[in-house]
Image (cartoon, grey):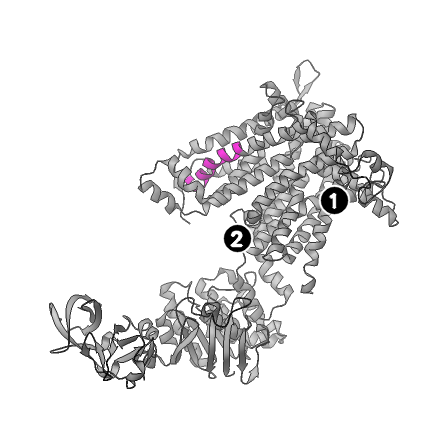
Amino acid sequence: MSSKTPNQKAWWLVLPVVLLVAFNAVIPLMAVVNYSVQETFGNNEFFFEGVRWFQQVMQSARFREALQRQILFTAIVLAIQLPLGVAIALAMPRRGIGLSICLVLMAMPLLIPYNVVGAMWNIFALPDIGLMGKGLNELGFSFNYTRQPVAAWITLVAMDVWHWTSLVVLLAYAGLSAIPDAYYQAARIDGASKWAIFRHIQLPKLKHVLLIAVLLRFMDSFMIYTEAVVLTGGGPGNATTLLSIDLVKIALGQFDLGPAAAMSLIYFLIILLSSWLFYTVMTRDEEH
Amino acid sequence: MSRLKWLVPTIYIVFLMLPIYWLLNMSFKNTNEILGGFTLWPREFTLANYAKILTDRTWYMGYVNSLAYVLMNTVISVTVALPAAYAFSRYRFLGDKHLFFWLLTNRMAPPAVFALPFFQLYSSIGLFDTHIAVALAHCLFNIPLAVWILEGFMSGVPRELDETAFVDGYPFWKFFIRIFMPTIAAGIGVACFFCFMFSWVELLLAKTLTSVDAKPIAATMTRTASTSGYELGLLAAAGALTIVPGAVVIWFVRNYIAKGFALGRV
Amino acid sequence: MARIHLEQLSHSYRPQPRAEVEADWALRGLDLQWADGGAYALLGPSGCGKSTLLNLISGLLQPTQGRVRFDERDVTALEPGQRNIAQVFQFPVVYDTMSVFDNLAFPLRNRGMAEPDVKARVIEIAEMLDLGASLANRASGLTADGKQKISLGRGLVRSDVAAILFDEPLTVIDPHLKWRLRSKLKELHQRVRRTMIYVTHDQTEALTFAEQVVVMFDGQVVQSGTPVELFERPAHTFVGHFIGSPGMNLLPCEVDAAGVARFAGHAVANASRDLNAARGKKTELGVRPEFVHFAGVGIPVQIERASDVGRFRIVDARHGAQLIKLLVDEGEPVPERQAHLVFDAQRTRVYADGWAVA
C-alpha cells in the first residue's frame, strides 16, 4: 500500500467533520467541566468550588456501589457474549440459503430501538403475563424480577445477551470467512483435530476482529442506559442501578449539576482509560 | 458431532425469536385478554391496536419523526465523513493521528453524560424540539463511526486510481463523485447502514431534545405507559411496528452483512 | 513410499455431470502411474485440471469416477490425514502462533509420536532445509520462502509419507529466491528419494525439476515423458507449442492423394509414416524453430525481422500469410529480404486434430 503524501490543505476536507463533532463534543464537555467545579444556588449564580464535587463523588458510597454493579455487569456480559458469539459463528453454515436466513434473523435484535428492547423484555419476563416469567414459575422456580434482585440481574443479563451477542457473531463470522481454504486443507493433511484447528488457525486469525468486538461490547455495556431503565428502572430498589442510570437520576432527576458533572467526567475518563488499556494490551501482542 | 452443528445456530435463533413472538402475540390481543389470562396465541385476534396506531396522528407521527431525524442524520454523517475519510486515507497533515483518535473517543461518550448539556445547548440556540436537533446530536457518535468505516474501505483502493484520474485531468470533485465513490460503494452502504442503525435505536438523546413536534415514537410509547395506564396491546403493536424499518433495511443489505462487518479491515 | 496408480479417474465439480458434455468435466478418463521415488512434474495451463488431479491424489477431493491406489491399496475413500501424503500449497501455510520447531513437529505430535523421536526427526529435517538456526523463532516472522520451507518440512518430517505433492509452490516467492528454492527441492529429492509430484504452469520449473513430465491440457493427459522426449518428439500440438521458447511452428498442411504432406504446395519430408489415416482431419506440420534452416532451395520466404537473444537470433520469416520462426546461431549470416527454408525431416511431424501422426 502506497504511503500518504503530506498535504496541509487536507484540513479543508476534514473541517466539516471537525466542526460538527466539536460542536457536539467540545461545547457540552466544557459546560460539564464548568459545572463540575462550581456550585449554584439557582438564579444563575455560580461559585468556584475546586475539586469538591470530585471528592464528594469518589467518596460517596452510592457512586462506588453503582460502579461496582457496572463492572460486575460488564464482566458478566463480556464473559458470556464473546465465547458464545464465537461458538455460534463457528457453527454457522458457510454459504447457501441457510446462511442468508441466519444472518438476517440474527441481525434483527440489533436494529430494534433500545426502549422497545427494554419493553419487550419487561413484559416477557413478567411472572403473570410474560412467556419467560410464567414459564419459569410453572417449572417450579419462584421468579419475579420486580421484587427479587437476583431475578432482576438474570433478566438484565439475558436481555443484553439477547440484544448484543449477534454483533459478536457477525464480526467473528466475517473474520472466519477471511481465512483462506489452504489453511484448512493443510490441517487436514497434517492430521489435526478440530480443537487443534480452532486453536492454531481460527483463533489467531480471529484476534483482530475479536479486539474490535471486545472494545465495542466493553464500551457499550459500560454505557448502557435505555434498555436497562425501561426493564427495571434500576430496581428493585437500586439492585440494578448501573452507572448511567445513576447519573441520569442525579442530573436530570435531581438537577444536582455539580456532582452530576463531576460524575460524568469520572465516568467518561474510566471508559477512555479502560479502552486505551485494552487496545494497547491487545495490539502490543501483535507486534511481537 | 458435526452433524448436530446446525443445532447451535438454530437454538440461538429460536431464543432470539421468542421475545419477538411474544410481542407480536400481544399486539394482536386486546388489553383485557392480555391481563385476563395467559394464552400462547390470541383467542380473539384483533387488529384494533394496529388500526389505532396507523390512524391516530399522535401515534404515527412518532414514526415519521423518528424516520425523519434518522434519515437526516445518515445523510449528514455520511456526506461530511466522505471527504474527511479521504483526507485521512490519502494525506498526512498536522495533527492527523491525534484528530483521528479524538474522533474515535467520541464514540466512547456515554449519552448519559451528554443528556443534560445537550438539552441546554440545543435549547440555547433555539433548536429544542426539532428533527434537526436530534439529527445533529447523533452526529456526535455517528460521524466518527462513519469516518472510521469509510477510511478502512478507502485504504483498500490503490492510490494509482487517484493518480491516473488527476493525470487525465479530472478536477478533484469530479474524480471523487464520478470515479472514487462508485469504487467504495460497498463501504458507503455499510456506513449508511450503521449510521441508520445507531440513530434509529438511540433513545436518551432523542427524548431529551424533543417534546411535541419532533417527538420520536419511543417517547410516545413511554408516555402512553404512564398516562393512560398500561395499554399493553397498543404498546406491543407500537413496538412491533418499530421493528419493521430495521427488518426492511436488513433484508436489503443481507448480501453485504457478513462482508460489511469486515468493515474493509479484516 | 509407494507406487501411485490413478485408475480411470474422472472428476466433475457439478453435482450431476452429464457424460456427453465435455465442459461438465474437469478431468476425463485419466490413467496414470507414478513409480516409487520419482520426481514428476504436472505441467499445463491454468484451468487444465492439474490442481484438481493433485487434490484427488491427496484426498482433499473425492473423485466422481475412478479409483486411487497406493501400492495396490485402494485409498479412494480415505481422508487426507490417513493417506500418507504431504502437500505444499501455492501460498505458504504456517501455524502463526507456533515456533518453527513446533510447526515441524505438529504432524508428528498429531500422530502420537514420542517426544524424543519428534525432536530428533525435526532437527534432522531442519538441517536439510537450512532452518536449523531458526527453530526457536516464531514461524510468522519468516519470509515467504522460509515459510514454504516449513510447509515442505512438515511433509518431509513424516517418514511414512508416500509422496509429496507441490501445488505451484513458488508462486509467491521472489524471483531471485525461486531458483534457490528450486535447487533445494532437487537436492532434497536426490537425498530423500521420496516420490515428488510438482504441479506448475511454468515449463522451466517443470523441465528442470522433473525426471518425468506429464503434460495436461483441458482435463486430459496429452503426453507423459522425459523433458528430452517432450522437446524432440511432442505427441500433441499443445506440447509443441507450450514447451520450448519460442514454441514449435505449426503450419497448415494437406495430405495429397499420394500420401505426401504439402505446405502451400511444397512437399515436405517428415517423420510421420501413416499419412493416409490423417486425410480428412485438420492436419498441421510441426517443426521447432531449432530444426528450420536456410538453404539454397526450399520454401520461399520473406525475412521480416531478426531479434537478437544472446547466443542466437530468432528470425521471423513469412510465406504468404504464414509466419515461420527459426533460430540462427550467432555467427551465421541472415539473408536480407528473401530466402529459402528447409525443415529437418527427422524432427518434422504431421499432426492430425492436434495429435501426432505416427
Up the image or down, B115 lies above or below A117; here it is above
Image side of residue A25 versus residue B41, left or right:
left
Q: Give whichever of C231, A262 is nearer the camera.
A: C231
Please name which of the two marks, 2 or 1, marks the residue nearer to the observer: 1
Instruction: Decide if residue A157 is in sight here.
Output: no
**Which label belongs to residue B21?**
1
Mark 2 neighbour density, 10 Å: few (under 14) some (14–19) many (20 or more): few
Q: Which residue is mark 2?
A: A287
Q: Element at badge 1? A: helix
The amino acid marked with disc number 2 is Glu
Residues at badges 2 and 1 in contact (C-beta under 8 Å)?
A: no
The amino acid marked with disc number 1 is Tyr
Q: Element at badge 2? A: helix
Up the image or down, A52 lies above or below A274; here it is above
Is residue B87 part of the magenta span, yes or no?
yes
**Disc 2 chain ID:** A
Q: Residue B59 location, x and y as percent? A: 69, 28
**Which label belongs to residue B2?**
none
What distance separates the C-alpha of mark 2 from that of mark 1?
47 Å
Magenta span covers which residues?
B75-91
**Disc 1 chain ID:** B
Up the image or down, A78 lies above or below C36; here it is above
Q: Give whichever of A149, C290 is nearer the camera.
A: C290
Quadrant in the rendering for residue A31 = top right
Image side of residue A237 versus residue C324, left or right:
right
Instruction: Decide if residue C160 is in sight here.
Output: yes
Q: Residue at x 59, y 18 (%)?
A: B126
Image side of residue C224 versus residue C333, left or right:
right
State the predominant SS element of the stretch in magenta: helix
> Could you confirm whether marks 2 and 1 are on the same chain?
no
Is residue C38 part of the magenta span, yes or no?
no
Q: Residue A138 location, x and y as percent? A: 87, 48
